[in-house]
Image (cartoon, helix red, strand yellow):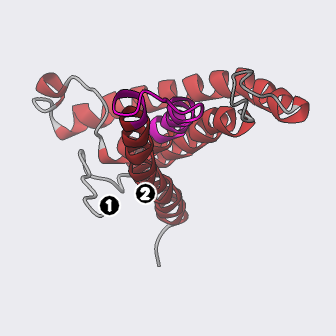
Amino acid sequence: MPSPVAVFAAAVTAVNRAAFNLAVVLVFVIVPIMLIEVTMRYLFNSPTVWGMELATLLFGPYFLLGGPYVLHLRGHVAMDLLYQRLSLRARRTVDLVNLPIIMAFCLILLWYTVPVTLDSFMYGETSFSAWNPPIWWTKAAVPIALFLLLAQALAEFLMTLTGGVEAAPMDAGL
């Protein structure tokens, strides 16, 4: 029977993998929007009112929702030249110091971003552009991604602490 830590880590990683896959799908939405915008602007001299703004609004969630799963894959910018030369024990120590810093960073940012997002939703904030779409949903991606990153950092920390993870797990199952 798997340990509660392993079950928690697997559940968090599965949710973050789903968010990552959603972010991947967003690329297939953003690229055609940009293609339409460029075509309309340069071939027909008639840019859309919505194209560039929608691509920008979608790029934020795209960028943010992939991050937590990338933490699991250990794909974030790191000092790999130094880290790879460390012993397994030293790598675990570095991870046990680094992951709580990530969690603290997420908690601080959550403290500030949740009220801003709630206000945006409650006031029905829009972009005030010619198209004027609601933007609370794109602002909501920030605290959602921070919460997912916090959960993934906690899962990685607990797995490292209990010895249930190798020094560099590479879960290629995208």
Between marks 2 and 1 in the image, the one whose residue lies nearer the viewer: 2
Query: Residue at left 52%, top 35%?
Result: 51
Q: CA distance from mark 2 to mark 1?
A: 7 Å
Sequence-first tag of 2 and 1 = 2
Residue at position x 28%, y 58% in the image: 171
Name the amino acid type tagged 1. Leu
Disc 1 packing (10 Å; few <14; some 14–19; many ≥20): few
| Residue located beneath label 2 in the image | 21
**Start and end of the magenta stretch?**
40-63
The foreground one among 73 and 162 is 73
Position of residue 39 measured from the top left corner of the image (x, y, whole percent): 36, 37
Residue 165 located left or right of residue 23: left
Q: For residue 157: magenta?
A: no
- The answer to if 42 sits in the magenta stretch is yes
User: Which residue is labeled 1 in the image?
Assistant: 174
Residue 63 at x, y = what percent? Answer: 45, 36
Where is 105 relative to 165, above or below? above
Label 2 with label 1: CB-CB less than 8 Å: yes
Q: Residue furthest front?
A: 44
Please state the horizontal and vertical placement of residue 13, each as a whole percent of the image.
46, 57
Q: Residue at x 35, y 52 (%)?
A: 163
Q: Is residue 14 left or right of residue 73?
A: right
Q: Is residue 171 above or below residue 102?
A: below
Three-letter amino acid code of the residue under disc 2: Asn
Q: Which mark is residue 125?
A: none
